[in-house]
Amino acid sequence: MLFEEFLQIPPYSLGREDKHTLLTRRLTELTEHHRVRCPEYRRMLDSVGYDSKRVSGYEDLPFLPVRLFKELILKSVPQEDVVKTMTSSGTTGQAVSRIFLDRVTSANQQKAMVKIVSDFLGASRLPMIILDCPSVVKDRNMFSARGAGILGFSIFGAKKIYALDDDMHLDIDGLCAFLERFQGQDILLFGFTFMVWQHFYRELVRLKERGTVFDLSRGILIHGGGWKKLASEAVSPQEFHDKLRDVCGLDRVHDYYGMVEQTGCIYMQCACGHLHASIFSDVIVRRSRDFGVCAAGEPGIIQVVSAIPESYPGHSLLTEDEGVLLGEDDCPCGRKGKYFKINGRLKNAEIRGCSDTYAAKFG
């Protein structure tokens, strides 16, 4: 089954049965694809006695702990076909995941992301403020998760500026000129959660106290990368949203959940505050005691599956995050598919999100 078939379907249009059938077919084929092409993956399948004949749904397919990508080189293409190596976020001394992409997988990541984000932003590219510094995007062949996030979302911007300089100070003059130029238009803002709070929101508060106010009431903020640091500072998602609205009028705020090990398959937050799985991916919540599938409302370990990865065996991964399935096909926003929330990192799991990793270094 070709990935192109997924691209012909609106990303939140399939009900449970149709999506389950589509993903089971694709993910079963990807399991065989990687079994043949990745010796390390084949040995892991053999060790658990994998038999495709026993698979009735994608929940039955083996999953890899996401941490394995920090410990092993896992790829299903020859090295000469690798066009990009992506690395996860990590504090000093932490091992990082290495994800090897060929042209097909890299292109499909971008195509899926365009379909997902366009469902929230519309088809038009918007003037864009990147709430980060330009030096993050360096080697185009070796992407950090932070740099990859910036470049991935940059495709939705028509005219772009970085709001912060390389010392992480707000470029006040540049921001003023940009907002004046695009006055009356919708503007896309993108950044990682802790950096938005620390270097953007707090500076706007300081400026407002001195009489300088920015109007971002036409802004749409997409942010992600983890809440661990802000949670430790007792900043909730609702307070994050409320404070931004109070200081600059920014009211359209979307968090997202994603990881470098499955780039492209991000889970966007709707206006109801729910994270949504598109047709390109899904979440399964599993019990820690036996890895059985949790019922809706029951907290457990998040497993993510993706229809995209062809150059590495990352199509079925057990994360180090705890979450809860909230429902399926019945979110008030109208999007079909599963919707869920993330409770946080599992106890003793490493800090790994872009936002939380930066916060650990910043702190």
Image: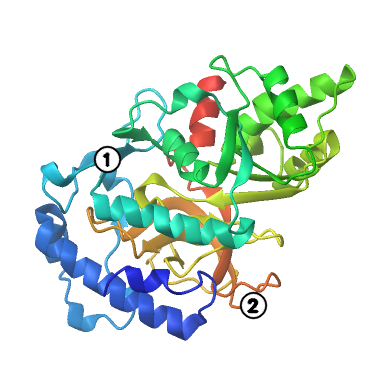
- Determine the secondary structure under disc 2: loop
Please identify the quadrant where the C terminus is shown.
top right
Say what amino acid the circle numbered 2 marks. Asp
**In this image, 157 relative to 58: left or right?**
right
The answer to which quarter of the image holds residue 330 is bottom right
User: Looking at the image, can residue 168 be seen?
Assistant: yes
**In this image, 277 relative to 93: left or right?**
right
Reply above or below: 113 against 129: below
Which residue shows up at 43% across the image and 47% down it? 259
**Residue on which disc 1 sits:** 84
User: Looking at the image, can residue 229 be seen?
Assistant: no
Q: Earlier in the sequence, mark 2 or mark 1?
A: 1
Residue 357: which numbered mark, if any?
none
Which residue shows up at 69% across the image and 28% down it? 200
Residue 330: which numbered mark, if any?
2
Residue 91 on image: x %, y %: 42, 27
Residue found farthest to the top: 167
Residue found farthest to the front: 181
Camera-nearest residue between 168 and 94: 168
